[in-house]
Image (tube, grey):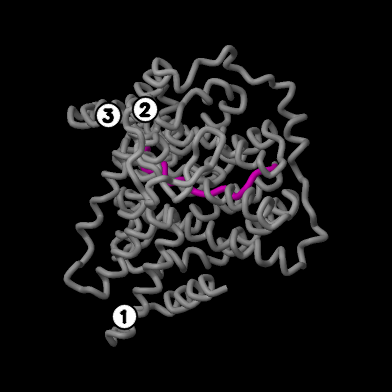
């Protein structure tokens, strides 16, 4: 026991970070359970593009395992990675079904993206972008992510409906209210489970119960079984003999003859843009809330953290899945007290285990993660107090960053609106020196992105 404690202390520096193994492990379990849905949703999404479900499931679990291990041991941060939502939808519905390319073409673009990010990380390009973001926007990113993940949780449980088109069973139909967002059916079994979970988790937080968010997820899952929105599997183990055969259907399926085409350039640029600012936004936002930023507002070891998603994306592409990125759900582990790579290591082990226990992890319904996402969204709001609302050149860009993340359903788009408005307002106000050269370049690139 003392040997294992010594290893954990030496590896993750628990005492220096004012934490302990129990807290970190609970935080890791919490993060994993909050984002375990990706193990099912990602294969379902990429299956629509013609990929093998079981193969993508294995690729999802393994790529999350590898990328999160890099984060744990190389960066020693409590951030967890997996194939990203949004990026997988762009892969399946825009590139493959919309533009008509093969999924092999799309997976080649993901491989190139990962390799480029590895190079950019080694040359500190992405780290320079993180440092260039002003502190007001870094705090705003944290708040925006809080609203964003709460929105994800509420819409996932059907408490709110999103978009002018809504899902009714297997059909997509017009939203009768014609609103961008409207109240959902709060008396449906899923919504009731989520609401009860919020109340129970909130009560546990009030009572300062350790592991409140994790307990809330477990309670909501059990409630979901009782309500009939999920059910216990007949067999909790994966047929190990089929894993290799499933992976062979999606792994290393590249179209290298398409690398030097204009079409590849367009698709690759979109992957690069969205992933870069989703990852940077998540790292900055969660780190800001966890007080991991230094006195200059920078994230120590940003290079190591950014390299984790670059490696994960490259490995994921080789195995057969879309872009791997840092998850906003990492905030749930941070809210439980996770401060070091031991949190990430715990989540990584669970992703590895999920490869062999797929049916078991499939029972966690979306509604069971809603309480965690909503209440973590609350925790992410506190950095708003650090924004100077008396200086409108700081306040307006911060507000646009915050509000556009949930409304545009994108961390990257929120950052884009914030950065562009920040540069324009500072220049118009004659405060040129407040804007770094990197910010000017990024603002121009964001404008070009919207135009093109």
Query: What label does residue 188 carry, if any?
Result: 2
Label 1's element? helix
Please tell me whether residue 339 belongs to the stretch shown in magenta: no
- Quarter holding the N terminus is top left
In the image, is 410 to the left or to the right of 38? left
Query: What label does residue 201 carry, if any?
Result: 3
In the image, is 290 to the left or to the right of 282? left
Mark 3 vs 2, N-terminal side: 2
What separation in Å lies between label 1 and label 3 (alpha carbons)? Answer: 43 Å
Residue drawn at x 73%, y 34% is 247
Which residue is disc 1 drawn over? 426
Label 3's element? helix
What separation in Å lies between label 3 and label 2 (alpha carbons)? Answer: 20 Å
- Residue range highlighted in magenta: 320-333
Q: In the rendered view, would you say 58 is above or below 172?
A: above
Q: Residue furthest bottom?
A: 430
Mark 2 vs 1, N-terminal side: 2
- Mark nearest the camera among 3 and 2 is 2
Query: Splitting the image into 4 quarters, where does residue 367 fall?
Result: top left
In the image, is 188 to the left or to the right of 69? left
Residue 178 appears at what percent x and percent y? 40, 51
Q: In the rendered view, would you say 218 is above or below 158?
A: above
- Quarter holding the C terminus is bottom right
Query: Badges 3 and 2: C-beta atoms under 8 Å apart?
Result: no
Residue 41 appears at what percent x and percent y? 55, 36
Q: Residue furthest top?
A: 234
């Amino acid at each position: 026991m003392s040997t294992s404690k010594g290893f954990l202390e030496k590896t993750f520096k628990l005492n220096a970070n004012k934490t302990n193994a129990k807290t970190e492990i609970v935080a890791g379990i919490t993060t994993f359970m909050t984002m375990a849905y990706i193990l099912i949703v990602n294969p379902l999404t990429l299956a629509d593009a013609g990929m093998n479900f079981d193969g993508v499931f294995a690729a999802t679990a393994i790529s999350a395992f590898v990328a999160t291990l890099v984060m744990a041991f190389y960066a020693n941060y409590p951030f967890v990675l997996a194939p990203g939502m949004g990026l997988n939808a762009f892969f399946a519905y825009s590139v493959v079904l919309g533009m008509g390319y093969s999924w092999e073409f799309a997976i080649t673009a993901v491989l190139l993206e990962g390799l480029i990010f590895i190079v950019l990380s080694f040359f500190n390009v992405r780290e320079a972008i993180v440092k260039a973001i002003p502190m007001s926007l870094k705090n705003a990113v944290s708040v925006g992510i809080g609203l964003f993940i709460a929105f994800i949780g509420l819409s996932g449980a059907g408490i709110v409906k999103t978009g002018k088109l809504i899902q009714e069973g297997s059909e997509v139909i017009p939203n009768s209210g014609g609103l961008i967002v409207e109240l959902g059916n709060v008396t449906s079994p899923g919504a009731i489970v989520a609401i009860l979970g919020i109340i129970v988790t909130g009560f546990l937080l009030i009572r300062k119960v350790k592991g409140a968010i994790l307990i809330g997820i477990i309670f909501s899952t059990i409630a979901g079984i009782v309500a009939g929105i999920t059910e216990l599997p007949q067999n909790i183990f994966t047929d190990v003999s089929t894993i290799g055969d499933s992976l062979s259907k999606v792994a290393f399926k590249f179209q290298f003859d398409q690398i030097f085409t204009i079409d590849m350039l367009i698709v690759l640029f979109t992957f690069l843009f969205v992933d870069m600012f989703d990852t940077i936004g998540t790292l900055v936002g969660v780190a800001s809330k966890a007080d991991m930023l230094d006195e200059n507002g920078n994230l120590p070891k940003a290079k190591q953290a950014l390299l984790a998603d670059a490696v994960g994306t490259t490995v994921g592409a080789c195995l057969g899945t879309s872009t791997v990125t840092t998850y906003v759900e990492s905030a749930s582990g941070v809210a439980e007290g996770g401060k070091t790579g031991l949190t990430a290591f715990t989540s990584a082990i669970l992703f590895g285990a999920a490869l062999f226990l797929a049916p078991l992890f499939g029972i966690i319904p979306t509604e069971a993660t809603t309480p965690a996402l909503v209440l973590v969204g609350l925790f992410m709001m506190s950095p708003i107090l650090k924004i100077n609302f008396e200086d409108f050149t700081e306040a307006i860009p911060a507000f646009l960053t915050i509000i556009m993340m949930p409304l545009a359903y994108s961390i990257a788009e929120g950052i884009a609106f914030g950065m562009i408005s920040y540069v324009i307002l500072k220049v118009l106000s004659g405060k040129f020196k407040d804007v770094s050269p990197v910010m000017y370049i990024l603002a121009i690139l964001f404008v070009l992105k919207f135009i093109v």
